[in-house]
Image: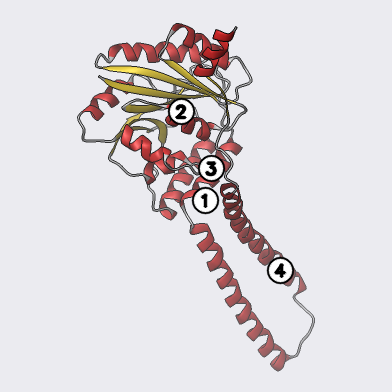
Amino acid sequence: MNKISVVVSCYNEQEALPLFYEEITNVASQIKDAEFEFIFVNDGSKDKTLEVIKEFRSKDERVKFVSFSRNFGKEAAMFAGLKKSTGDFVSIMDADLQDPPKMLIEMYETLKQGEYDCVATRRVTRKGEPPIRSLFARIFYKLINKISKTEIVDGARDFRLMTRQMVDAITSMEEYNRFSKGIFGWVGFNTKWLEYENIERAAGETKWSFWKLFKYSIDGIIAFSTAPLVISTIMGILFCFMAFIMIVFIVVKTLIYGDPVSGWPSMTCIILFVGGVQLFCIGIIGQYLSKTYLEVKKRPIYIVKETEENNQKKEVVI
């Protein structure tokens, strides 16, 4: 019998978790030829998320959990869940029910046929999202697919079901700065895409503000493209060429017409513009250096405070 691991990253999801658990256990009961394990990763929640997960565990031995010492982010939580999973097939899902658990049935039936290594989902609409957020999301996907060799599908969700071989390939990439949407594409493997319309959260509030998404998109561009460095180099060459032309022009003008003091406002604007471009290019280089700095320190991606194993040991001691 096959085994399916369901990895769920949780940050302040005490309201959504009971609804999610009811849905996912219902789906599991419909898949007769597979056993399940549910891996909840508590990403340093400040509410009663961990207590809710422990309550699930007390009633259902299929439930496992990893609790971080603090909030390390969704990327770290997904990685921890994948590392802990033991199933032949592994799914990543959100606890807010924006990823419909019932789609797992179709995903599993597809992977059983052996033609694909992964069944992933993408949203075809962004109904319910602020217009400015949807606009920037579309711009990001168009931009990164132009400057990166790794294909990142527009509207792609983290919700997917993968074979053990693909999961092992992903967990072998232990980089500190993680951008999973890019990693999924970079490792390759045959992927089938399932489309669905956007579904709003079942409960709770989103943890992704516009600013967090913007920083996340910058991380994705830096992680899977060196095009910004090329752009900064081209801009530097272009401005050097323009400066050389202007020097020749000024020398010739001075020799022919003299050198009256004029044009200082335009010169000030040019200096400010060129200075801004220089700072912009330095900022690009700084982003790459900062990511390199974080990688070479070799800090752990996450720190585990508690799991169901050591929680059981505590209960035995008591």
Q: Is 167 left, or right, of 55 in this rendering?
A: left
Marks 1 & 2, CB-CB < 8 Å contact: no
Residue linked to disc 3: 176
Q: Residue at x 52, y 16 (%)?
A: 203
Tell me the CA gap for discs 4 and 3. Answer: 39 Å
Taking the image as shown, residue 194 lies to the left or right of residue 300, namely: left
Which one is in front, 173 or 120? 173
Badge nearest the viewer, 1 or 4: 1
How busy is the neighbourhood of tag 3: few (under 14 within 10 Å), some, or many (20 plus)?
some
Numbered label tally = 4
Which residue is depicted at the point 35% across and 17% down? 36
The label shown at residue 110 is: none
Left/right placement of residue 39 relative to residue 90 reads right
- Local secondary structure at mark 3: loop
Would you say the residues marked 1 and 4 are in contact, meaning their CB atoms lie under 8 Å apart?
Answer: no
Q: Badges 3 and 1: C-beta atoms under 8 Å apart?
A: no
Mark 1 to mark 4 CA distance (whole Å): 29 Å
Q: Amino acid at mark 3?
A: Tyr
* Residue ID for mark 1: 222
SS assignment at label 1: helix
Measuring from the top left, give residue 271's x and y in whole percent: 71, 68
- Please name the residue that numbered disc 4 is placed on: 271
Q: As displayed, is residue 100 above or below residue 138?
A: above
Q: In terms of sequence position, does the residue under pointer 4 or pointer 2 come before the other?
A: 2
Residue 274 visible within the image: yes
Tell me the number on the disc at residue 81.
2
Q: In front of the other: label 4 or label 3?
A: 3
Q: Residue furthest bottom?
A: 256
User: With respect to residue 305, does 231 lie above or below?
Assistant: below
Disc nearer the start of the sequence (3/1) = 3
Label 2 crowd (10 A; few <14 / some 14-19 / many >=20): many
